[in-house]
Amino acid sequence: MSEKDEETFKSVDLEQQTQKSPEPDIHPQQPPSETDNPSTPSAPSAPPAEAKAETTPSARTSAVKAKWKSSAEQFKVKRFFVLRPGTLDQGIEDVKSLVDPTEDGPVQSVWLMTEIDHWNNEKERLVLITENNLLVCKYDFVMLNCEQIQKIPLNIIDRISQGAFCFPPHSLLKREGEGVRVFWDKLREPSFTSRWNPFAIDYPFSTFTYHPVKGASEQLGRLCEIQNFKEELTLAAQKAHSKNPVPGKANGVLVLNQPILIEAYVGLMSVIGNQNKLGYCLARGNIGF
């Protein structure tokens, strides 16, 4: 076989080999990615299933706890008789009818307060500011009857303080929040027997704080606001001092921002009474068998 024939044979052989076994593609074709088509907006990727499993139960638990707490607080607030329809309006009308226009003067404002005595006991009160007197009324919202009225002439009020509650260093009691204390005889100090008598009523001051139903409605929020109460009482007392000054006594009202000290140390009776709201007209359920 000549050299020419041999070259022709070899070229035919290589071509057939190429058709039988083509070379593998070094760069295999990839599926089209999201970036290959820039005109199509990419959809937001969904969060992993594990992340959902972690966040969803905790958020649901927090919502259930908040709802349960809100329902419990609403149940506790609704037990107060003062929230029964028409009860508060009837109580205000009843105490207003007991005001003597000659002695007390016209009524300027009415407030729903909690009075705190010297043993840290809470007591529900309707408080009236008239032209001449401050009236602290013990009103029974169950029987719709005014049981007691304490009258404090405005012209003898000499000091009004507002601040957070505090106790002596070795006291076992605690109370959060703030209040207003009204003084009317700074020259007289409570006696030793009065300090240790839980029923003493000869203290020369009264202490008030927010009623528990202050957040039930906008109207109750205005009636229970101690800041507005302090301001109106201060103006009324200053007018009374200028109109009817007390001989031998400095005129005017001293307004202070300072902590309100409650000199109670153990107060087991107040702890039990305040936790069970014994000083309020409250629906306490059925008692019997």
Image: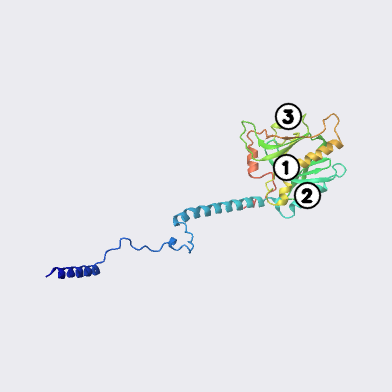
Q: Amino acid at mark 2?
A: Ile
Which residue does the image show at 75% across and 43% down from the upper left? 229
Q: Quadrant of residue 166?
A: top right
> First in sequence: mark 1 or mark 3?
3
Q: Are marks 1 and 2 in contact (CB under 8 Å)?
A: no
- Vertical order, 97 against 174 (above or below): below
Mark 1 or 2, closer to the camera: 1
Nearest the viewer among 57 and 272 is: 57
Within 10 angstroms of label 3, few (less than 14), some, or many (20 or more) residues?
few
Q: Secondary structure at mark 3?
A: loop
User: Residue 156's x, y, as percent?
Assistant: 81, 34
The answer for how far apart the CA atoms under marks 1 and 2 are is: 21 Å
Q: Are marks 3 and 2 in contact (CB under 8 Å)?
A: no
Mark 1 or mark 2, which has the lower sequence index?
2
**Residue 160 picture location, percent across and down:** 75, 36
Left or right of 244? Residue 53 is left
Distance of label 3 from label 2 (alpha carbons)? 35 Å
Amino acid under disc 3: Ser
Which residue does the numbered mark 1 point to in the structure image?
227
Q: Nearer the viewer, residue 126 or 29?
A: 29
Which mark's residue is nearer the viewer, 3 or 2? Answer: 2
Please state which amino acid type lies under the numbered disc 1. Gln
Give me the disc on residue 92. 2
Q: How many labels, in total? A: 3
Residue 167 is marked as none
Q: At numbered mark 1, what does the secondary structure look like: helix, strand or loop?
A: helix
Q: Earlier in the sequence, mark 3 or mark 2?
A: 2
Mark toward the viewer: 1 or 3: 1
**Mark 3 sits on what residue?**
191
Q: Is residue 4 visible?
A: yes
Colouring:
rainbow
70 sits to left or right of 31: right
